[in-house]
Image (cartoon, coloured by chain):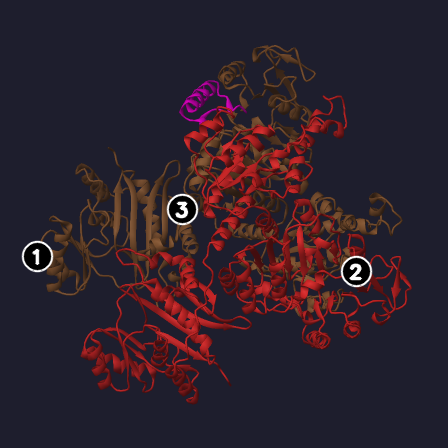
Chain colours: A red, B brown
Amino acid sequence: MTENPLHLLMNPQSIAIVGANNNPTKMGTVQALSILKDGYQGEVLLIHPTEKTVLGLKAYASPEDLPEVPDLAILIVPIKSIIPLIESFGKIGTKRAIIVTAGFRETGSAGQAIENELNNVARRYSLRFVGPNCLGVINSQISLNTTVLTVEHKPGFLGFASQSGTYVTQSLQVLRKRGFRFSKAISLGNEANINMVDALEYLGEDEQTKAIILYIEGIRDGKRFVEVARKITPRKPILAQYVGGSASGARAGMSHTGAMAGPDFLYDGIFKQAGIIRVHSVEDLYANGWTLATQPPLKGNRVGIMTNSGGPSTTIAYLCDSVGLHVPRFSDRLQKEIRSHIEPHASAANPVDLTFDVGIQKLAITLPEMMMKSGEIDALVLHGVMMTGYLRELYPHFKELAGNISLEEFLKYAQPVVNEAFELPRKYNIPFLISSFFDDEDCYTKGYMDNNIPVFRFPEKTASALGCLYRYKQIRARAPRKDAALPKIKKAAREIILRALDNKQKALDEYEAKQLLACYGVPVTKETRAAKVEDALRAAKKIGYPVALKTCSWEIMHKSGRGLIALNVENENQLKKEFKNIQKNAGKTVPVLVQDMLSGSREFLAGMTRFAGFGPGVVFGLGGVFTEVFKDTTLRLAPVTNADALEMFEDINARKLLNKFRGLPKVKLNNLSRIIQAIGNIALLHPEIAEIDLNPIIIDGTEPVVADALIVLEDKS
Amino acid sequence: MTENPLHLLMNPQSIAIVGANNNPTKMGTVQALSILKDGYQGEVLLIHPTEKTVLGLKAYASPEDLPEVPDLAILIVPIKSIIPLIESFGKIGTKRAIIVTAGFRETGSAGQAIENELNNVARRYSLRFVGPNCLGVINSQISLNTTVLTVEHKPGFLGFASQSGTYVTQSLQVLRKRGFRFSKAISLGNEANINMVDALEYLGEDEQTKAIILYIEGIRDGKRFVEVARKITPRKPILAQYVGGSASGARAGMSHTGAMAGPDFLYDGIFKQAGIIRVHSVEDLYANGWTLATQPPLKGNRVGIMTNSGGPSTTIAYLCDSVGLHVPRFSDRLQKEIRSHIEPHASAANPVDLTFDVGIQKLAITLPEMMMKSGEIDALVLHGVMMTGYLRELYPHFKELAGNISLEEFLKYAQPVVNEAFELPRKYNIPFLISSFFDDEDCYTKGYMDNNIPVFRFPEKTASALGCLYRYKQIRARAPRKDAALPKIKKAAREIILRALDNKQKALDEYEAKQLLACYGVPVTKETRAAKVEDALRAAKKIGYPVALKTCSWEIMHKSGRGLIALNVENENQLKKEFKNIQKNAGKTVPVLVQDMLSGSREFLAGMTRFAGFGPGVVFGLGGVFTEVFKDTTLRLAPVTNADALEMFEDINARKLLNKFRGLPKVKLNNLSRIIQAIGNIALLHPEIAEIDLNPIIIDGTEPVVADALIVLEDKS
């Protein structure tokens, strides 16, 4: 295995910066100052064509003039200088760079050409780089910060790979206020060279990183992304936000980092398959990521809620149900124990609500500890702890009464902070989340944050974070992935395709498609292709009435609603009539498929489409007439394992239809799974196939049978 | 119309407080200080049984000793003193009170008894009160604050009625930091006397209040709530958060304020019917409420995005699509105009992305103004404006370079704030939302907040607020509600019910149910009830084969899956066989319904259930076998208007099925609407009916026809 290019880039012994000068408003200067002032202990070398001294340090005229070969070059210069500089650094032996400069692929084809050339030059020197059009990296372990703003906090546990530079710069002070701290953060920019997948792999290997968050506008190497993520998620959680999947989002992303977005359901599917937890805001990305990075794993689904405020606790309880968690009523024993500590009108059942009582000991220690010890909860949420924040709010009212003392004097009335409050999650190995309206002007908010206990500004946010902990519990519980070996290519299947291609067909006809599917064990309707009515009559007799009749021609891909199908044909007379009818509606002589008429009332679909960079995507969902009404489908990349398929069955809203349902028996899920796996395999074995569409797959008793099939071939024209 | 009891309660000329003393840790003292120190100009009278002076003011021993009759009494005393005090205040002529004390209904039946007695005493003296178990009220117009914490801001526009006291106290400082300001706020507590609907009505009438927010754990007087809200929403937006609709939420709320929660779909339905916008977090309640209170109405769905950060703008663009809004690509003309102001690699298409550029003039004024003037947008979101916040972040890096100046000195490098930036929404009458990572340590964040332009901490939140603006645009566009007159009671319908009741039936049989429905014009299947097979054969001949056979007995309410139904009976022989079969499966001699076999493949349902306090709830949704699979239903309270019904059709996910669909014609929606209206009317006219369940309603061509009906009668036993 080759070493991940970010190992060296994130841990340079020496850095050369090009683009800093003595003008404090220049971005290059600002970024150089971040490196110089935030604690980085390595060598910093400044390059400037004319200045002798920059920011108080000796400046060198060019890379060639440097006294040593820097491990990393950072370029914040006009675009025309980028390629010559990379060439120079390549020549002297520098192997890593960060290119901040924008104006490449994201601006259109001319920029794309420069970006391609840049990559060619870099490749010539085995120089790997982050960017262009990025804001750099943060490695808190060695106090390296190449971004614009200040990182002044101690090292953290959250690894971040971002297709937006803003989320590792402008947001730094929000993160500091909220107590969230990066282990490593990488602004990826256009990913001309080092990309999202490299960053993900690096963060997966990084020991300091306990949870990984990803901000994604589009992934190019989707197949490798899934492979890499899949290896990480059983031992380290990954959260991702994807914002490319709407028309407006895709256009905005394209002009931002030139990201090629894909449809939302594609990303939804690959995230599920890889065990990545999807979130829908950058706040959740940070806060829920921090929760996963700091809290012990959730062992069950029982949440305890401790509060002095009915509103927040009711809200949290309400939302827990919606993320699969449960707020159990406590046992009589535990309630009795709690009751001895609270007012008679307060509730001990869970949520435990002290009502308006701001005493710290009971609220923050005694009762939470009692709940954690009880064995009746798997996670605890605490709302309402406050001390100096509360006093600050009271001060204007008490100032006069207290003899016009200053705020500082007044705050001395606060009781000393009880550090025991911050030890609970580690002591009992139970996730512990705080909801508070106070920022770090309150000593308890600050205490929790300093002790890596996540504090949420609004109560609803704790339920969202608990939902992520619970989802990760499920992901960790998944059996290790076993990819079955791909089957051998079936000669008969290959011949069907080659014959169709010879024939200049754009698709297989239904009969051919089903023959091909059958080669790979997919159950299909009994059927015969009949050119003449006599053949049809013979076939129907053999199959047994009732039968279905359909035109069978690759040129007629979509048959429904055009009089080209006759269902429930009961007898010979009806068959003759319908056969004629179909010929008439087709407007020419076409072969007719005589088909077993399946009677099941449950209809599903499965299909395959190829996505650039991702390979074949296999779709399963509700089929038949409801296909377009509910768009109830789910996707995985091929190869699809049996475990993947079983998860797909759980994904769809219509999942109840797969079970015993209104007198119908449970569907044989393993057989349905084999169909879905087969589609993925067929796509991998036969690159000539562009699309597969099996709809409906009718459940005949307990057996899924493909009743209609369309296989579209790659358009080589 | 009687005056709303909150008019006087919120605007007292004089207030008596019972429960304050000279101990600064007592809640009564703290609340008295809020009244005394936050600027209230009326008379404040303190009552204390023993102290002569409290908080530096003369204290009176009892209400009877007061020198004048206070308009409002505030009680923060042990529960045993509450009723005697209310009696005393009643006697001296005080007409309003706030009862903070807890321990009533929320604690169980003993507390409920005290609460009932309290209400009886108050009624005797026509004394109306808020509470018990509440934290009081805020009227920023007269600087009246009876809560625990400080309100120090200027009057606002947001009216709040809350079933949680925390949300009008603990959160006050968050609101201040975020620039959200109440007009009036009311902590309702147990609502023993003045309730949520009174508060809603009051806020609806209050001129200072421009938008209303409601935190709801359960509503008792649901019918009046909808009536009152419906009158307000055409001219003033209402947002509501409801948290009672899950098992955990309902239990938590019950022990909090004794609120009786109802199912989530009930509240969802009444909110829609009344034009109330539902939100799912208290943060959205505050922030989106503030947006609606301060921003001009949205005129269309086109959003402009101005930024220096690709991530936030891409995210906002992505989310706009999901709330029905559109981020249009700007015209070439406008793009050209914009392009002359930005870097060549920056995007002018919308989002307009300056890329990393913190120059205020272009970002905050020139380009936003250009976009607002263009006529190409209906709302504008701006992300990335920052000045002193940004400088604060740079300071640690620049400190030394700038000669070790202090932060204050360094901040003087900031350019003066350009107030033009804050005038845009008023100048162009276009909603304007700010996304910023900076709090009010940044002079622009502060400027926007001070000028009533909402600032959101994370970009996603702007899309949520825009979604509310857009939803309110739709609500305002609704035609004024016209309740049709209730039809007269049909004698025949009444007779069917009376006969069934005489007969001690718990339900009507299917035949009776449909006869009743038909009385009110509901189209039902052609059918005859047949006791003997000969009758059945005669009926089938008249109706025409194929027919359906079903048992017809009120004792067998649920027939499916038990061999009590035969569909598609084709001929006499089959009828005879199936008739016998049904008798066998029923286990006794039962009449059989011979029914027209409808052929439509689209099946819906409609129904009615009564909810305590709300009256009849009418449900419409997807029917047939998919009923339980998708639970795709929507609710309105009776009477249901035609406009209500048409909105219900838009609510369901399966709405496409109502239109032209796969060769099927568009359903006659007015006829379907008449069925739904009729169900509501029947429920209102016949209180003996407990439940109605019409499933399926089959679409026969374009016509909805009720194919199965269950009408359950009120259980009087």
Q: Circle 2 — which element?
A: helix
The answer to whether residue A480 is seen in the rendering is yes
- Tell me: residue B177, above or below residue A292: above
Q: Is B144 contained in the magenta span? A: no
- Tell me: residue A428, above or below residue A63: above
Q: Is residue A562 left or right of residue A152?
A: left
| Relative depth, front residue between B98 and B223 | B98
- The kind of secondary structure the magenta stretch mainly shows is helix
In the rendered image, the residue lying farthest to the front is A1
First along the sequence among labels 3 and 1: 1
Q: Is B119 contained in the magenta span? A: yes
**Residue in the image at 71% along x and 64% along y:** A8
Q: Chain of mark 2?
A: A
Residue position for label 2: A27
- Image spot of residue A548 (x, y percent): 27, 75
* Kind of residue at badge 1: Glu
Q: Circle 3 — which element?
A: strand
| Relative depth, front residue between B199 and A556 | A556
In the rendered image, the residue lying farthest to the right is A52
- Image spot of residue B529 (x, y percent): 15, 52
Labels 2 and 3 positioned on one and the same chain: no
What residue span does the magenta drawing correspond to?
Answer: B100-128
Q: Is residue A171 left or right of residue A561?
A: right
Labels 3 and 1 positioned on one and the same chain: yes
- Tell me: residue B318, above or below residue A362: below
**Residue in the image at 45% along x and 37% along y:** B218
Residue position for label 1: B534
Cα separation between marks 1 and 2: 95 Å
Q: Chain of mark 3?
A: B
Residue position for label 3: B636
| Relative depth, front residue between B595 and B78 | B78
